Image (cartoon, helix red, strand yellow):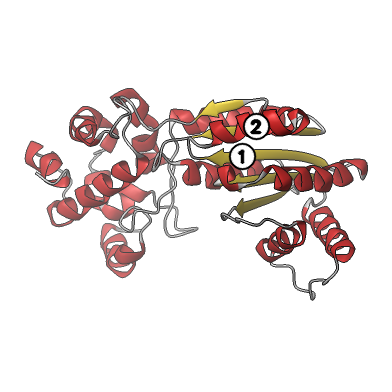
Amino acid sequence: MTIEEIQRLRDQVWDEHPLIIERAVLPTFAIKDALGRVWGLGRKGRGSIAFYAQPLSGKSSCAEIVMVEMRRKKPGCGVLIFEVVEDTNPAEGRLLSEILNQIDYAPKIARDLAGKRTQVHRALLALSGEARHLFLIFDEAQELSCDEFAWLKSVINRLVRDRVKVTVVLFGQVELKEKRQQLKAARSDLEKRFMSTLNELKGIQSAEELEPVLAAIDEASEFPAASGLTYLQLLLPQFYQGGGRLQAYRTQIWRELKKQRLPGVGTVVAMASVAGYLANLFIHLRDLDGEELKIPAEMFQKAGGE
């Protein structure tokens, strides 16, 4: 594409761009570490790993990246992200129905419990695909009750008996640590099954940890799909063509971002803060795009709200 063609495309899709709408899924060192752990666990016939995080630290983004990367690394596998909602009166039938709903199960859901169990088993068996490997990712996992963990164990055991690999990944708020203790007190087998490994998923803590995020924007991203354009190339095409890269400004960007650290977590910057800052930065730079652009210090300060 010529610069003029990219600029016309940019004007058409600006309001849909993942960075501008603050919905870009970008890698961090913590997310890369989580990916490595999940992939390593996936060699087992049955395994589970749990991650807890402070609010806005990027756990939902991590769940999405795990979904994409597991599909890429293991073609033919099945991945389900299940968003748990609080249920003050949990029942196995409701949990099974919700699993079917989140799979977009087309047939009519059975009314009796035995029928729902069979439908969930068949649906997950089909979802496991040619690889016969299923990655079950639970977001807001702290909302799962001890009973729900027991019912999930039964669902997983049945799949394993049918020679399906099942890898469970739990993402939750810090309350997931309390849930682990509750499981240990009520049913130690459930604690060992689902949360024998509990890791903290942290936000960005340094300019070095910001590096993979900026590198992805510069070189390892694409929008629109199949365009071949990286995020930076589309948003600032002349700057990009002139050799400009955000990675060169990581120190200046981090200087502003660290002012937005999470309260009570002294060194961590929430991914939501990173997303908001980057969106503001590109909005301020849009009309300054040029091959000779050297981003002035005041632009970094303006993006931070100063």
Q: Amino acid at mark 1?
A: Leu
Task: Give how far across and how far down residue 108 sits, in percent.
Answer: 79, 76
Q: Which corner quadrant holds the C terminus? A: top left
Identify the residue at horizontal 32%, vertical 49% (top origin).
233
Task: Give how far across and how far down residue 38 sits, in percent.
Answer: 64, 32
In the shown orientation, is residue 176 left or right of residue 154?
left
Identify the residue at horizontal 51%, vertical 37% (top origin).
175
**Circle on res. 170:** 1
Mark 1 touches mark 2? (CB < 8 Å): yes
Q: Quadrant of residue 167?
A: top right
Task: Give how far across and how far down residue 53 sits, in percent.
Answer: 46, 35
In the shown orientation, is residue 216 left or right of residue 141?
left
Identify the residue at horizontal 60%, vertical 28% (top origin).
36
Q: Amino acid at mark 2?
A: Ile
Q: Secondary structure at mark 2?
A: strand
Give the camera-side residue of 156 and 288: 156
In the shown orientation, is residue 119 left or right of residue 257?
right
Name the residue at the bottom extreme. 108
Q: Within 10 Å of the Cα at label 2, are there few (<14), some (14-19), or many (20+) other Cα atoms?
A: many
